[in-house]
Amino acid sequence: MLNKIPKWNLTLFVLIIAEMIVFGMINPRFWNVTILLNSFNDFIAISIIGFFVTLVVITGGIDISGVSIIGLTSVVTGLLSQVVGINIWGSILCAILIGGLCGLLNGVLIAYGRVQAMVITLGGMLLYSGIAIVLVGLSGVSTYEGISGFPEDFSSIANGEVMGIPHSVILFIIMFLIAYILLHRTKYGRYIYLTGINQNTADYSGINTKRIIASSYVLSGLSAGIAGVVLTSYLGSARADYGSEYLMPILTVVVLGGTLITGGKGGVVGTALASILLGFMQIGLQMAGVSTQYIGLATGVLLIVSVAFLGINPEFRLNMKRILTQKQHIGG
Amino acid sequence: MPRVRKIFKQREFRTFLFLVLLFMVVGFINSDYLSLQNIDRSLKSSLLYIVLAVGMTFVLLTGNLDISVGGTLGLSAAVCGTILRDGGNIFLAVITAILIGAIIGLINGFGVIKLKISSFIMTLAILSITRVVQVIYTDGKWVENIPANFKELSNIDIFGINLLSFIVIVGVIFVQLYLSRSSKGRYYNAIGDNAGGAISLGIPVNRYIAYSFVISGICASLAGLIFVSQIGFVSTNAGAGIELTVIAACVLGGVSLIGGIGTVVGAGLGAIILTSINSALVFMKVPAFWNDTISGSLLIIIVVIDALLAFHANKKAKKLRLNARVL
Amino acid sequence: MKAPRNLVRLENIRKAFNRNIVLEGVSLELNESEVIAIIGGNGAGKSTLMKILTGIYKADEGVVEIAGEKADHLNPSSAHERGIYLVPQEPLLFPNMTVEQNLTLGFSKDKNEVRGESAKLIKELGWNLDLNRLAVTLSIAEQQQLEIIKGLLRKSKVLILDEPTSTLTFSETESLFKVIKQLKNAGVGIFYITHRLNEVFQISTHAVILRDGKVTLKGKIEEFTKDMLIQGLLPVGNENHYQNQFKRRRSTHEGEEPILKVENIVGDGFKNISFEVYKGEVVGLAGLVGAGRTEIAEAIYGIHPIESGKVYLDGKDITKLSINETVDSGLAYIPEDRFLNGIFSITSVRNNITAQLIKRHGFFTKKKLEEQVADQYIDRLRIKVNSREDEIKSLSGGNQQKAVIARALSMNPKLIIMDEPTRGIDAAARGDIYSILTELKSQGFSILLISSDLEEIERISDRIYAVYQGTCDVCLNVDQINAVNVMKAAFGTFKGSDMTHA
């Protein structure tokens, strides 16, 4: 049975347990279920996007525009509900759909326009946050204050709890399940993997790889939309600049979770575990009295180490051996 | 004559035309835009970006990406500012800053070449690390009270022309000549254009990739120096988000993200265009919040057009090749 | 009369990769003003031999002498220095640099000198190469010209031309021959690797035939006829590599409708192709590499468009169908390049086998069903694997190919197009695949076999069509199939005039 669980996920799980023990020993307040569960609020946005960026990365692409879509959907939610006066739930739906539209633009240009994913989502990052800023500007709302005054219902999306479990945990589980089932139990998910492993072979097998790739970006956009709504609910106001600091963490949880940046391998279980690992680490470090900037340091180092170790496993070990023993490379 | 025609055909010329067009359109709407004073000011504010774009071009030519430049800029600026503020020697400050850039570049190069990490991830990680290092170094505080004499350096005018602008422009020209004329300079293009071909010609590909990162790092720290001098103080997030603008500038200027195509002149022009759009909006009384939207759209449009053109050229070439074989 | 100076001497060259002997006892001499045509089938060892000469490989045994001096430790740059230059079949250029930049890159001479010399050379050769054009805009012929100039600039005394005319038009070829004659007169020695026997007689002074790593024929061109050259390419004696398990179907197919009917199709890389495949037979598409067979197959399968003509599968018009629709109609294609297009390397054997059939399973994947199917095929095709969840990458080439075949079979095709199914597979696994083919035949499947291994095609096919340079004029019926005819057909000399040297 143990054989079935990928080694890397197991490692992540062990690391989570380990850090829980360590942080708890440093500050026993850490061992508080409520605190741990509430910490999900801090990384729920990252995780939601992370799950679906994982899909994109598995197809061999990358999506960095999600961080801007967060801001855009936040602004749209705020504007539609507070300024235009549309029902809050309608506004949320619109906002999320707009996230999907952004993803559609990304996806079409990347899959059919044959442009590098990096570039398009880079441009998208600028464009979507730009649109958010324009919307704020045009509507005359103050950029510093953001749009607030949301109804109770809305703020309970992120801030409420069910039987003592914060909504964010439930949301985490729901989004995880959706991503997991999609990726590991459906034809679509299988096609995502196959497209990422070898797009040529997938084409030859009759798989519509372009549609698969484009749709993965739509999902990523939708997830960013959901994250934007959740964040707005959590913080109580809609701003255009939400999400900008999330780029690193999102990529980190995807890569740390064991998904190869080159595509074809990985999964959302790893992303979920990595999110929890990182999220607990943040709280743990805070409780241990470490200032928050070191956390950024840890994230960066973790990213390098995990990619180097995972992505090119056999080659990396070979290279390490070479560096350490300084063997001459005899060319063929 | 054919020489002149050759210049017209270059991508860079088209970028230059775009710049001229931009100035003309805006100048038409608000003639103050064309004043010498404004052009001088525009140029000065774009120097930072030009220097960054030059360094970034080296990396892009070889087919890689350097997203860490903003962090390098911030860190170098912070260190330089601190040394100056505490009464240190100007030369010490400058040399230290440059060293920092070079070291960060070396680390990036190491990760990409030896650890075989994609440049995107490696430089992204280094970015977050340098940001943190900067905060730790400055204790989370801004670096202020920098001696005026250093700040004045960027304002010196010789014969009415800003000295710094002059140096940067001359520098760009020299780098351009190096990259396009000298045999070693061509290596960067070669590596991005056809890495396999470069290897078979005996070009030390890995070494030059390392050089490209080091150069990018040094340019970032030079930009940091300019930052300190022009802005006068270093905030904790100095340079944040700048890397994307720099990449956009390079792409606008005709540097391809795939590698092998592009010049520093083009990148420099792209940098000027981006900073000019900013001020152009002001002069056209367009609210500044349109800036990102315009830059982002521009980037996407240019890149898509480029890709489509390349795809069609490829398809045509392949068709020709196949049909040449038929009896 | 002075004897021409010796440029290159290869004696008893032996080269093996792992346990695969690629060259054995090859001896060859090239003198000034000689053009030696090197002819051989795929895998004969031609390119390995040239790579040894240009320092990319090192011979295991034997002597390499250049201009009378031993050349034991060659590498590409020292080979250049000693005057040897290989003009590759696919030009190795920097597409986004100008012609001039391509010429001067990595070349230690002064740039102005190089520019001046190239301009002079181009003029002398009567070519029209603009030094300032971007390499990517050059036609294939011009790219080749660029490569040749690179070689001449380095004052090469020995030029190796690897299939230089495979992508040239008639007039460009003539122009190339003029150059070769000029070089010949100037004392340059040329190795000319080619498939085209006509050309051999047009411009070479000598001919060498390589077969399975050995020289089977060598001498002045005057001594040979085309037939003699073909003879040299054939297997020695009567080696019966494969058991006579292949009983050819003797059938006139009277009144029978073909399973696959290709009518005068035209596309990129081929024109006026017509042939038929009937139920339960193996039809071979013989030809040399680059003849256009893969292009034809991929067009039939739906990857590339067919410009005119029609394709019928069991009576249904599949000309304009997408890949998916073509598969659903009952056509399967096993691609030529297994690694590039055939397998999903970093996933399990099961996933590879079920990649196509899962589309019939509905929205959710049915793991149990998949496992059953995979197990069935592993059994039926005797795929050697520890578990169906093993990564396909870890399997041998032969077993990987079986998995690809399994995937094709899983869609219940009527006709399977197999493109080089045994390439890169060792002898034992080959036999296994041939058995599978026989079984499939007896079960009523039809197979279109594309292979450059002329022996293989000769042994397995019931009927053979030959494709030569994008056209298909030859059909060998059961009685006409023998080694000589197949060879001739592949080399385009089957019908009509058996020309002796020009």
Image (cartoon, coloured by chain):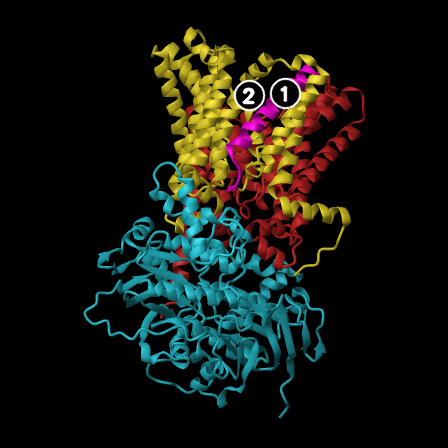
Chain colours: A yellow, B red, C cyan
Looking at the image, residue B214 sits to the left or right of residue C141; the answer is right
Q: Is residue B162 visible?
A: no
**In this view of the protein, which residue sits in the foreground, C45 or A206?**
A206
Measured from the top left, where is residue C80 in percent x and y?
Answer: 65, 68
Measured from the top left, where is residue C263 in percent x and y?
Answer: 25, 64
Looking at the image, residue A319 sits to the left or right of residue A93; the answer is right
In the rendered view, tell whether residue A215 sits above or below residue C97: above
> Is B253 colored magenta in this rendering?
no
The residue wearing badge 1 is A282
Which image quadrant is residue A36 in?
top right
Measured from the top left, where is residue C189 in percent x and y?
Answer: 58, 78
Looking at the image, residue A51 sits to the left or right of residue B264; the answer is left
Magenta span dominant secondary structure: helix
Question: On the rendered image, what quadrant is the C terminus of chain C found in?
Answer: bottom left
Question: On the rendered image, what quadrant is the N terminus of chain C found in?
Answer: bottom right
Q: Residue at x 81, y 24 (%)?
A: B88
Instruction: Mark 2: give few (<14), some (14-19) or many (20+) Cα within 10 Å.
Output: many
Q: Residue at x 31, y 76 (%)?
A: C477
Q: How many marks?
A: 2
**In this view of the protein, which residue sits in the foreground, A205 or C138?**
A205
Q: Residue at x 49, y 51 (%)?
A: B6
Measured from the top left, where is residue C200 in percent x and y?
Answer: 47, 80
In the rendered view, tell whether residue B287 sits above or below residue B301: above
In this picture, which residue range is highlighted in magenta?
A263-291
Circle nearer the N terminus (2, 1): 2
Mark 1 chain: A
Q: Residue at x 67, y 12 (%)?
A: A29
The residue wearing badge 2 is A43
For mark 1, give the secondary structure. Answer: helix
